[in-house]
């Protein structure tokens, strides 16, 4: 299947906000809309909202029909240049059997979000070839302070076409910023962790690991043959859980074709350490001779880089140089 890259954003474009997983009503318990809309004004973008984003059921979500309708409307509306998710959740994969893949393929546009949105993004790649973007949610833009690196990476990827070389942030945070914007806890970054040396280029597949696992054995799982994996997980994933989820992914028949692995920074509550992760990597036979880099700035800590699911990247893990470059996004 041919890869489809959506048009890049331009000043004056319209961005549609949707909720494929959790409802905006949950997010609005801590309302940072003013910060969010000011940021998009500065970017020269206009926000519009799906009709059903504030519906809320017992699972802090809404009906499959409502979520599908908002997604279909966003792709079909010619005035919409990009689609941004409010937040993640737990149930994005419920939508997959009901999506109009031909509609999505015929109307390629930027789709950005992360966490549970991983299921939708990788399914879009598998069924249509459209490149989507693991990056900030609409709600993430409400972070008042320490947001500049995340915004810079997002802008470079969704507005520009030049290769983007990611570098470690100087500080990172893992605090409940949405509860109290005045009490933040920046942590000095100890840099990336080169786990295994080598150089690789490939098609980017990944996002949130335990969500990507949900697609295994379904028609919505993209091929791992020739893939450069970029994965991360949140505080609910202990080292043991991450180990078995990674093992499950790398036991897929086409995982022998994985060319490289980059792992996002773990939240502190996961209790992952570098020695534990190195032990986990050591147990994976399909990673023999494959470059592995960890503690990169993607995932559930901040700042977090935007990367293209279905795009092309290069990973270099050598003694004098460790780089991750988004070549085509």
Image (spheres, rainbow, N blue to C red):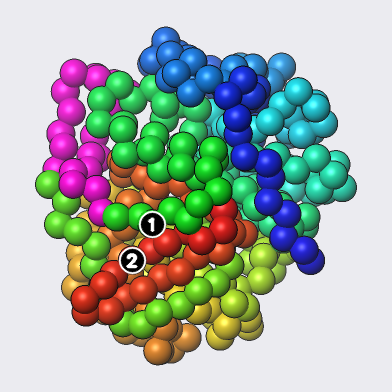
Relative side of 108 to 122, left or right: right
Q: Determine the CA span between mark 2 and mark 1.
A: 7 Å
Identified at 62% across, 48% down, the residue is 132
Image coordinates of residue 251 in percent, x first then y, are 54, 80
The stretch of residues the image draws in magenta is: 168-187
Residues at marks 2 and 1 touching, judged by CB atoms closer than 8 Å:
yes
Q: Is residue 182 magenta?
A: yes
Of the numbered discs 2 and 1, the one sitting upstream in the chain is 1
The percent coordinates of residue 80 (x first, y second) are 72, 26
Give the structural element (helix, strand or loop) at label 1: strand
What residue does disc 2 label? Answer: 323
Q: Position of residue 313 (x, y in %)?
A: 50, 65
Q: Residues within 10 Å of mark 2 (few under 14, many from 20)?
A: some
Label 1 sits on residue = 165
Q: Is residue 131 left or right of residue 260?
A: right
The residue located at (54%, 38%) in the rendering is 159
Q: State whether residue 67 appears in this view.
A: no
Helix, strand or loop at label 2? It is: strand
């Amino acid at each position: 299947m041919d890869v489809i890259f959506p048009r890049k954003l331009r000043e004056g474009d319209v961005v549609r906000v949707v909720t494929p997983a959790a409802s905006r009503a949950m997010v609005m318990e801590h309302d940072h809309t003013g910060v969010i809309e000011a940021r998009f004004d500065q970017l020269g973008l206009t926000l519009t909202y799906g009709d059903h984003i504030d519906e809320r059921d017992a699972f802090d979500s809404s009906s499959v029909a409502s979520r599908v309708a908002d997604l279909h409307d966003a792709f079909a509306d010619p005035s919409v240049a990009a689609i941004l998710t409010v937040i993640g959740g737990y149930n994005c994969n419920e939508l997959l059997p009901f999506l109009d893949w031909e509609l999505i393929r015929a109307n390629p546009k930027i789709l950005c979000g992360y966490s549970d949105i991983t299921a939708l993004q990788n399914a879009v790649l598998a069924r249509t070839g459209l490149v989507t973007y693991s990056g900030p949610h609409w709600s993430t833009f409400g972070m008042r302070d320490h947001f500049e690196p995340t915004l810079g990476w997002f802008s470079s990827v969704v507005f520009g076409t030049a290769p983007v070389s990611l570098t470690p942030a100087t500080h990172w945070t893992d605090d409940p910023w949405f509860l109290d914007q005045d009490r933040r806890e920046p942590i000095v970054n100890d840099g990336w962790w080169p786990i295994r040396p080598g150089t690789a280029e490939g098609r980017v597949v990944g996002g949130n690991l335990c969500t990507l696992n949900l697609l295994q054995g379904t028609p919505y799982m993209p091929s791992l043959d020739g893939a450069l994996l970029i994965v991360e997980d949140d505080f609910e994933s202990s080292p043991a859980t991450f180990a078995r989820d990674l093992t499950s992914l790398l036991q897929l028949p086409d995982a022998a074709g994985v060319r490289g692995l980059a792992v996002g920074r773990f939240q502190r509550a996961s209790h992952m350490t570098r020695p534990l992760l190195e032990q986990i990597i050591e147990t994976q036979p399909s990673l023999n001779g494959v470059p592995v880099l960890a503690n990169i700035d993607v995932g559930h800590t901040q700042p977090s880089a935007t990367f293209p699911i279905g795009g092309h990247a290069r990973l270099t893990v050598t003694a004098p140089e460790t780089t991750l470059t988004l070549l085509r996004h």
